[in-house]
Amino acid sequence: MLKVRGLTKKYGDTEVLRGLDLTVRRGECFGLLGPNGAGKTTTLRLLLGLIEPDSGSIELAGFSVPKHAREARMKVGVVPQMDNLDPDFSVRENLFAYGRYFGMEKSAIAARVPHLLEFAGLANKADAKITQLSGGMKRRLTLARALVHDPDILFLDEPTTGLDPQARHLIWQGLRQLIADGKTIVLTTHFMDEAERLTDRLAILDHGCLVAEGAPRALIESHIEPVVVEVFGEGLADWTRNHAASLCQRFETVGETLFCYSNNADTVIDALKHAPTLRYLHRPSSLEDVFLKLTGRDLRD
Amino acid sequence: MFSSNSPGVIYVIRLLHLPQLSWRFIPVWHRNYLVWKKLAIPAILGNLADPMLYMLGLGYGLGSLLPDVGGMPYLTFLAAGTVAYSTMNAATFEVLYSSFSRMHVQRTWDAIMNAPLTLDDVMLGELTWAVTKSLLSGLAILAVIWGLGLFGNFWMTLWIIPVVAMVGFCFGGMGLVMNAVSPSYDFFLYYFSLVITPMVLLCGVFFPVTQLPEVVQHVSAWLPLTHAIDLVRPLVTGTVPDAIGLHVAALLIYGSLGYVIALTLTRRRLLK
């Protein structure tokens, strides 16, 4: 459905992408993860043919991009990071206007609108103004708008950023329904739980290239020890110096927390019983641990 | 002669990204039309009140003190100028404030470009919509001219309609350049102070250009509004304009150059 080979893009002297390869299969939900500035949004813009790569090839929905970007975009629905619904139109009119951009007949759009409003949970808001919608409703409408021309593949750029937990779950529910309907989905996200929940495969992007690619569980298994004990409290520095290295496979101190990565947490937990000032959290390792291991813990601004 | 592959030509083509026109601009025009239609009556009244008041107030008030101006009653003279002037304003306001809202504030253009439309289509849609607004504005003034019987030959005045469209195209294209480079609405004031207002005073809206010092007349001859008025005024009084080709070419060249330059600058602004 999507094949990217050797994609590079420079802005001035900054190399935003340095030879990106990606393959997304039909019916798959694919996640693109990476810290701010890793090149996620640039990648999406390149895939849509909005900007031209310096080198490399893109094949999207059977069309070569950017040469046949128009044809490719006929097959793609886009949910951008920032809401850009048309504030001059009502909910229903937004869907009609967007359908016309794809060259659809009014009757063809009208046939799809009730279903789309239902899907977005906005059937009773059809005539509301955009300014009257909550953040979650706007995002659901943007998702419905991206489906107006019944695309084969959907691009979502951080679809749940800025939404409250209830609204996020509604979006996830919608996306799972689309996956069940056989749509191909490519999404970028900062939320590891979102990626773990939704994607079949994901790629972690940093400094313009892929640093890892695979199914979420497989990535966790291949990159990191299965359990983590997070230790915090008074006297942590001394304890870390004296015990950490001997008790776990790998450890890392971030701020006031010690992360002990291990195949078996019992040794760490037993040792912690002799350190009453320290508290701990024992949990299975997650995608976030992989992400932080691979992209580092430095703040990216 | 340049051959098409001479380096100079290629450089200019690269620099000025030649537009790739397609019919896909129509939904963009249609979008603007539907939004306008919602508030059509107040929009029309609001847009027309101003030029109409100037034209009738000055035309009757000042006109009663004056002998014939440019060989016609002052009201007629002013009415012809007002057709060009209000048409220019209609297109300019549309591509400055309204287009800027859609491009920068509402990000409507971004949304449209995720559909199979290009920036070329979006800006052509904006430009043709500006032409439409100009036509509405020009037709309204023309209706007053007909109503007050300020014309020489009715059939001749019908030629004003295509002229008005060209004036809208000219100032729509030019205004899009300002839209491309403006950081905020405030910036447009420079364009009005430095371009639009001087043109109103130098191009023969309120008084004949021949009243100006000769040096200024030379400047005036290069300004697009002068060409617009040189076409409209004879058509109002019922004579065939001089140098039609020159005036038409000037309007079309200013407009096309504006569109192409605006496209290049906007591409740089949005798609980098």
Image: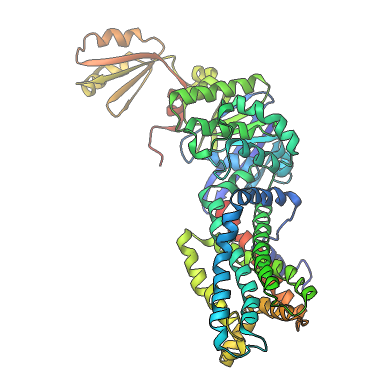
Query: How many labels were placed on the picture?
Result: 0
Residue B70, by quadrant, is bottom right
Of A105 and B173, the residue lying toward us: A105
Name the side, left or right, on which B121 lies relative to A142. right
In the orientation shown, which residue stands out farthest toward the bottom?
Answer: B214
Could you tell me which quadrant the N terminus of chain B lies in?
A: bottom right
- Residue at (48%, 41%) from the top-left corner? A37
Front-most of residues A299 and B219: B219
Q: Position of residue B105 (x, y in %)?
A: 50, 50
Where's residue A225, x and y in %?
A: 44, 16
Residue B50 in the image: state x and y as whole percent.
54, 68
Q: Is residue A55 visible?
A: yes
Above or below A199: residue B253: below
Q: What colour scheme was applied to this rendering of the protein?
A: rainbow
Q: Residue at x 48, y 26 (%)?
A: A167
Instruction: Decide if residue A163 is on the left or right side of residue B117.
Output: left
Viewer can see residue B272: no
Residue A19: horizontal and vertical position, in percent? 60, 40
**A279, B224: nearer the viewer:** B224
Which residue occupies the foreground of this view, A132 or A175?
A132
Q: Is residue A52 above or below residue B58?
A: above
Q: Height in image: B200 above or below B48?
A: below
